Image: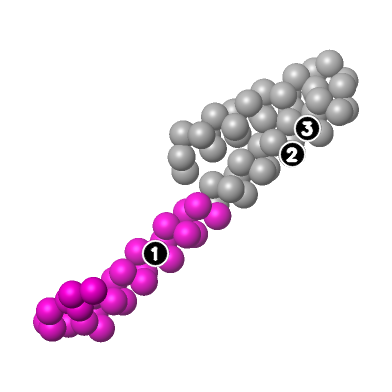
Amino acid sequence: MTMKHRIKQAVGSAREKAGEVTGNRRLEASGRAQRRSAQFRSTAADVRHRARRAVREAQVRLRGSRPADPR
């Protein structure tokens, strides 16, 4: 999770709580949407990172002890 996603999640949570306290449903809903959007983006970034790592590891295993392609 990047710092950017953590900040957006915190801001979304704060907006959601402020909406709950004041009874402002729009503020609450927009905060919830912002928090969930940041969670989704964070998860997607984590999946991308793990997939890239798995591809690199598979390439290394397939390559074995042969020298790397000079391209």
Amino acid at pointer 1: Arg
Q: Specify whether 15 is left or right of 54.
A: right
Magenta region = 44-71
Most common secondary structure along the magenta stretch? helix
Q: Quadrant of residue 17?
A: top right
Label 1 sits on residue: 52
Per the model, the C-alpha gap separating discs 2 and 3 is 5 Å
Label 2 sits on residue: 33
Q: Residue at x 39, y 64 (%)?
A: 52
Q: Residue at x 21, y 82 (%)?
A: 63
User: Which comes sooner in the sequence, label 1 or label 3?
Assistant: 3
Per the model, the C-alpha gap separating discs 2 and 1 is 28 Å
Q: Residue furthest front?
A: 71
Q: Which mark is residue 30?
A: 3
Q: Say whether marks 2 and 1 touch (CB < 8 Å).
A: no
> Up-down: is 21 above or below 31?
above
Q: Which mark is residue 39?
A: none
Q: Say whether marks 2 and 3 touch (CB < 8 Å).
A: yes
